[in-house]
Amino acid sequence: MGSSAGGGGRWYTGMSADNIKGLVLALSSSLFIGASFIIKKKGLKKAASSSGVRAGVGGYSYLYEPLWWVGMITMVVGEVANFAAYAFAPAILVTPLGALSIIISAILAHVMLREKLHIFGILGCILCVVGSTTIVLHAPAEREIESVTEVWDLATEPAFMCYAAVVLAIVAILVYRFVPLYGQTHVMVYIGVCSLVGSISVMSVKALGIALKLTFSGMNQLIYPQTWAFTLVVLTCIITQMNYLNKALDTFNTAVVSPIYYTMFTSLTILASVIMFKDWDRQNPTQIVTETCGFVTILSGTFLLHKTKDMADGLSASSSFRLPTSSSFRFSKQTDEDSEGIPLRSSESFRSPP
């Protein structure tokens, strides 16, 4: 207990110069990433209006849209800042600040995209942020790593290899089975792929960050093949995440995509870290129970977000009794959801490609 108290006391004696650098980088990262969601979506909408084929149904015309590339560059800048923040400050300081990107994204979506969120949706977002913040604030500090080969040994232990195998299996099922059937109607499908892949990518990002930090300090880690293996994993995961995140943003409301993505991504990343770095082995029961309460809070927020969709569907269904044809029903559903402003899907997602 004495060592635990001493370890905890270090956090309250003032921030080091490195921690301040990490804090500034993390805040900048949240600002850039939150803005990138909105800029990219405006680019997706502009590309869809000019080509008639949306990203949500397999179109890639957004690659020729400058505004989308501005959003992409903004996100890359944010991710680089976030990557650098982990090199200077512990994850317990950097990760919770990712919640700020949700708030920034929601505010910009309301101002720039005219997207509205039901009061219960707002409460759901708050619960998601509070739950995620509770988890990461009570997570243990990262263990000291002195070589990229040490991270490789952790990544190739049976427990994490089993986790990685399960993740890849679920992603394959989602991509080949559920995306064609439910990708356009259930937000969890696209976000599930992004989050599962993201949990693997963060572990690789940590390894790569450690390798670069050690290299810059004079201990060259670029000579190890493990460094380049982690780099390949990072690139593959990022490409996959960006592809399905584009589909999610083009199909569903930004104010809903952001908190759900943040919630699932954070939860799965913490789970991956617990398995790979054995974080819970260094925690007492109180800390573990607190983190569990954070998960319950996240589940409550996710339920409210989906309840918001149920309320919108109920309003749409009630008005359909006045309309005799299926085409009129679809038109009524779109009109009701647009006018009520209770979105889990954005209005443009109901347009069929020509």
Image (cartoon, rainbow, N blue to C red):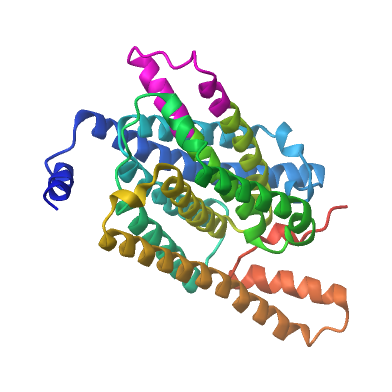
Q: Residue furthest front?
A: 158
User: How far from the left and from the top, in percent, is residue 123?
Assistant: 43, 69
Q: Is residue 319 above or below residue 183?
A: below
What is the quadrant of residue 13 in the picture? top left
Of residues 323 and 253, the one drawn nearer to the viewer in this rendering: 253
User: How far from the left and from the top, in percent, is residue 91?
Assistant: 35, 41
- Magenta stretch: residue 237 in it? no
Q: Is residue 313 left or right of residue 285?
A: right
Looking at the image, which residue is at 31% across and 38% down? 90
Looking at the image, which residue is at 88% across and 79% down? 325
Q: Is residue 115 left or right of residue 136?
A: right
Q: Is residue 117 left or right of residue 193?
A: left
Q: Is residue 22 left or right of residue 305?
A: left
Q: Is residue 140 above or below residue 20?
A: below
What is the quadrant of residue 59 in the picture? top right
| Chief SS of the magenta region | helix
Of residues 282 and 308, the one drawn nearer to the viewer in this rendering: 282
Total residue callouts:
0
User: How far from the left and from the top, in percent, is residue 209?
Assistant: 42, 28
Residue 114 in view here:
no
Residue 208 in view here:
yes
Looking at the image, which residue is at 31% across and 30% down? 88
Looking at the rendering, the stretch of residues picked out in magenta corresponds to 205-231
Of residues 51 and 242, the one drawn nearer to the viewer in this rendering: 242
User: How far from the left and from the top, in percent, is residue 29?
Assistant: 42, 38
- Magenta stretch: residue 207 in it? yes
Looking at the image, which residue is at 45% across and 43% down? 276
